[in-house]
Image (spheres, rainbow, N blue to C red):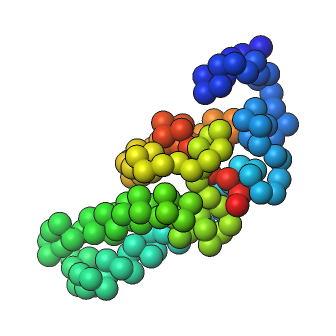
């Protein structure tokens, strides 16, 4: 038997029937863990939206040639971060999350607050924490922020 570091009062087995079981989440439907396909799709939608906005504000030529780009080369990433930080506390997830029927909440349920999306997004931008998952398909960025991406 193991003790879950997020929930030390729970004794858990190393084997689970489905992601989120040890967190008390249902296997399917509302409140179940957001699956990888939806997560990747939401990421694509969010980054595409950020790139479109960056192109609208800074123009395509700025991105075409790196020697001309300067600081605007990072505009899509900055806009992506702003979308995450702004929309997670206000509508429960990024536009991509909401379009694909997911939401971000505290691991124990409830509103993630204002500072958790900042931590989550900062680690998401580093990329590596987002691709290292535990048995519940929570990335390091979600674990560090105490959040979870669930079907909404």
Q: Is residue 103 above or below residue 131?
A: below
Rendering coords of residue 115 (x, y %):
40, 46
Q: Is residue 51 above or below residue 39?
A: below
Identify the image quadrant of the C terminus: bottom right
Q: Is residue 73 above or below residue 92?
A: below
Rendering coords of residue 91 (x, y %):
54, 65
Rendering coords of residue 134 (x, y %):
63, 35
Q: Can residue 120 be seen by looking at this rendering? A: no
Rendering coords of residue 114 (x, y %):
42, 50
Residue at the location (60% across, 22% down)? 5
Identify the image quadrant of the N terminus: top right
Using the rendered view, name the quadrant where residue 50 is placed.
Answer: bottom left
Residue at the location (18% across, 73% down)? 69
What is the total number of numbered labels drawn onto the structure image?
0
For residue 150, side relative to residue 53 (left or right): right
Using the rendered view, name the quadrant where residue 93 is placed.
Answer: bottom right
Residue at the location (17% across, 66% down)? 71
Residue at the location (81% across, 41% down)? 18
Q: Can residue 63 be seen by looking at this rendering? A: yes
For residue 143, side relative to residue 121 (left or right): right
For residue 137, side relative to residue 86 (left or right): right
State the residue in front, 16 or 60: 16
């Amino acid at each position: 038997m193991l003790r879950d570091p997020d929930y030390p009062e729970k004794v858990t087995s190393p084997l689970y029937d489905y992601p989120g079981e040890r967190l008390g989440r249902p296997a399917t439907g509302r409140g179940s863990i957001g699956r990888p396909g939806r997560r990747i799709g939401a990421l694509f939608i969010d980054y595409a939206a950020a790139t479109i906005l960056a192109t609208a504000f800074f123009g395509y030529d700025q991105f075409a040639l790196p020697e001309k780009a300067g600081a605007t080369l990072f505009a899509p990433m900055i806009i992506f971060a702003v979308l995450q930080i702004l929309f997670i506390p206000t509508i429960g997830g990024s536009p991509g999350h909401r379009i694909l029927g997911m939401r971000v909440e505290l691991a124990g349920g409830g509103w993630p607050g204002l500072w958790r999306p900042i931590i989550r997004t900062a680690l998401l931008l580093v990329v590596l924490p987002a691709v290292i998952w535990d048995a519940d398909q929570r990335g390091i960025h979600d674990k560090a922020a105490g959040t979870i991406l669930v079907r909404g």
